[in-house]
């Protein structure tokens, strides 16, 4: 396909698309590319052709393999390409620059996922976009919606890996997205479904960004639709419905609207083990999607070197630490990464530095496991740890009953034990402690649980298909009927035989066909006796001298 582009594209745009398609074949090396870099690498080509304008793009776009029948490759991801780069591409395709902003608005604001629905875009540009662009590189593999409104998705990446994203609505109008930073996780936390899977690969900055961009554009689309509905009702003289009125009042009180307002890196993977791509995604999320740094929380098991780095480079982003145990022995058993990162002493030093550098409070996450880390003794141990290392007013503890997983035998703590644990920390040590509500518990919304369910179903489906394949022969062999009239005198070895099914033959595949038949009339009884005598008096023997078979009538 790309060999025929010279007639419709400037040569440097042709090189851009060709180069990008090559990069698309190596997702583990990062499935993103810079238009600036690609244009620079084709500078020799541009000197031989007339360039439309000098590119200034400095970010990245992702690539996607299209699953259409012609197997062409979509090299522009409209969910992740920055506006400046989209302008470069649109102009290179021979269209006015302003068209790029129209396309950008359709995807980011209107939430459109089909190019054909962009009704103010000319036909030629639509054709170019359908050929070279895709609205997203993540394929939705499964979606579940909880009774509390939580939406959980399993996305399949271009190389077949699965990741998860969750959207959580709150009664005050907030929408929080929980996203993944890795496919799998190498930290090995024994109670975590993702930790039990192991690590597959890092997510690119664009794969991280797209998870957020999708939720943001869908909520924007929902907001646009509600405004249109409200406008329509007002024009008809009906005014606001009670639902719209209540929501608008709530949004005015909270200062929020139907938009993505908060983001937590608490999905699959360890964000600080993919620090470079997470940092890049956060910067784009803030600048392009309008989610402030203070509304973004990064959760880590305790990658100490990158906690120091985050304090310097992302000081406005909030930090949460999965602590779960207050001594090294128990924490290393539950979270093997504790020992690799120097234990609790090094972690507490890093948190001290973070607090003094950023002036921000640290959140300590504590998954309560009944009978293991929810006892009064454990609460006192945690209180003493905080008192020794950190300012109590700069620490907030979030406790949440464990989300059970198939690979861990622990069970969640009951309400009384949760309240007792928090009471000790607050009353005895002055540390803020808040029980968190488990959201989406009815849809496996815990980290890695939906992916595990998808992989389990795939495995069961594959096993079932293999069993059916083994059980059914490749070709159905014909059933042979042998009667006294079609036996041959001699059949030679390796001789090609032709058998024909008797048109009066009865199929005996059903069990009911095996029921004993009652012979009643004299003719039926006589025929039965004749057949019995025939079977008793006929044998098939092998003629070893001539290598064939012969029929011998037994003499009575």
Image (cartoon, rainbow, N blue to C red):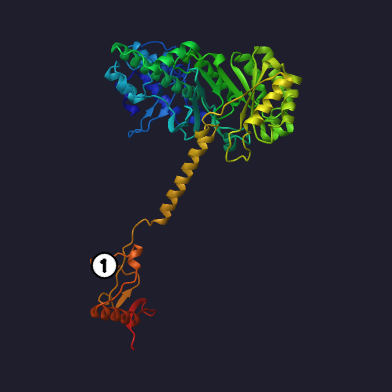
Name the side, left or right, on which 175 lies relative to 113: right
Numbered label tally:
1
Image position of 80 with respect to 542: above or below: above
Q: Nearer the viewer, residue 17 or 95?
A: 95
- Asked if residue 477 is positioned above or below residue 109 in the image, the reply reads below
Q: Report the side of 285 relative to 49 (left or right).
A: right
Q: Position of residue 345 (x, y in %)?
A: 74, 24
Question: Which residue corresponds to the image point at 34% horizontal and 57% vertical from the top-left?
Answer: 475
Instruction: Kindly state the secondary structure of the residue where label 1 is placed.
Output: loop
- Work out whether residue 46 can be spotted: no
Residue 383 position by quadrant: top right
- Residue at image coords 32%, 80%: 532
* Picture quadrant of residue 411: top right
* Residue 418 percent across, percent down from the top left: 65, 29
Most foreground residue, 482 or 263:
263
User: Residue 150 at x, y = what percent?
Assistant: 48, 27
Residue 547, visible in the rendered structure? yes
The image quadrant that residue 513 belongs to is bottom left
Q: Residue furthest bottom?
A: 556
Split into 4 quadrants, where in the image is the N terminus? Answer: top left
Quadrant that contains the C terminus: bottom left
Residue nearest the viewer, comparing 253 with 238: 238
Q: Is residue 262 left or right of residue 542?
A: right
**Picture coordinates of residue 84 (x, y %)?**
42, 13
Please tell me how crowded label 1 is: few (under 14), some (14-19), or many (20+) other residues with Cα within 10 Å. Answer: few
Residue that numbered label 1 is attached to:
505
Q: What residue sits 47% from the left and 34% below the top?
A: 159
């Amino acid at each position: 396909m790309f060999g025929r582009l010279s007639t419709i594209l400037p040569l440097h745009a042709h090189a851009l698309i060709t180069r990008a398609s090559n990069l698309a074949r190596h997702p583990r090396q990062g499935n993103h590319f810079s238009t600036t870099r690609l244009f620079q690498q084709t500078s020799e080509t541009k000197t031989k052709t007339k360039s439309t304008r000098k590119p200034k793009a400095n970010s990245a776009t992702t690539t996607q393999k299209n699953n259409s029948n012609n197997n062409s490759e979509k090299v522009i991801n409209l969910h992740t390409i920055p506006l400046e780069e989209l302008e470069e591409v649109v102009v290179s395709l021979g269209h006015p620059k302003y068209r790029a902003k129209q396309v950008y608005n359709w995807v980011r604001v209107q939430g459109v996922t089909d190019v054909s629905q962009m009704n103010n875009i000319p036909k030629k540009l639509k054709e170019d976009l359908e050929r070279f662009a895709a609205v997203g590189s993540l394929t939705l593999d499964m979606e579940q919606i909880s009774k509390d409104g939580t939406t959980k998705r399993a996305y399949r990446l271009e190389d077949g890996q699965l990741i998860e994203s969750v959207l959580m609505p709150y009664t005050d109008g907030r929408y929080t997205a929980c996203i993944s930073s890795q496919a799998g996780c190498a930290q090995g936390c024994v109670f975590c479904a993702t930790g039990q899977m192991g690590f597959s690969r890092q997510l690119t900055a664009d794969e991280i960004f797209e998870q957020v961009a999708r939720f943001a554009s869908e909520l924007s689309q929902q907001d646009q639709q509600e405004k249109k509905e409200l406008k329509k009702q007002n024009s008809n003289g009906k005014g606001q419905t009670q639902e719209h009125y209540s929501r608008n009042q709530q949004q005015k009180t909270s200062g929020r609207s139907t938009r993505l307002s908060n983001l937590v890196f608490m999905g699959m993977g360890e964000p600080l083990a993919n620090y470079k791509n997470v940092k890049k995604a956060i910067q784009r999320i803030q600048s392009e999607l309008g989610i402030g740094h203070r509304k973004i929380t990064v959760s880590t098991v305790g990658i100490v070197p990158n906690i120091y780095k985050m304090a310097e480079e992302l000081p406005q982003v909030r930090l949460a630490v999965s602590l779960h145990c207050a001594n090294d022995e128990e924490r290393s058993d539950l979270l093997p990464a504790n020992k690799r990162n120097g234990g609790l002493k090094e972690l507490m030093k890093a948190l001290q530095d973070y607090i003094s550098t950023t002036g921000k409070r640290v959140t300590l996450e504590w998954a309560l496991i009944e009978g293991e880390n929810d006892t009064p003794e454990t609460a006192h141990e945690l209180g003493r740890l905080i008192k020794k290392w950190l300012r109590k007013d700069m620490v907030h503890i979030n406790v949440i009953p464990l989300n059970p997983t198939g690979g861990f035998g622990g069970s969640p703590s009951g309400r009384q034990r949760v309240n007792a644990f928090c009471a000790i920390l607050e009353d005895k040590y002055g540390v803020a402690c808040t029980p968190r509500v488990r959201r989406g518990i009815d849809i496996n919304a815990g980290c890695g649980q939906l992916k595990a369910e998808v992989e389990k179903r795939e495995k069961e489906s594959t096993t079932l298909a293999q069993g059916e394949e083994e059980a059914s022969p490749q070709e159905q062999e014909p059933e042979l009927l042998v009667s006294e009239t079609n036996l041959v005198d001699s059949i030679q070895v390796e001789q090609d035989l032709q058998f024909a099914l008797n048109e009066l033959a009865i199929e005996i595949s059903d069990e009911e066909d095996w029921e004993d038949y009652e012979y009643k009339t004299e003719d039926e009884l006589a025929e039965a006796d004749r057949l019995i005598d025939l079977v008793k008096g006929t044998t098939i023997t092998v003629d070893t001298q001539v290598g064939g078979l012969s029929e011998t009538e037994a003499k009575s």
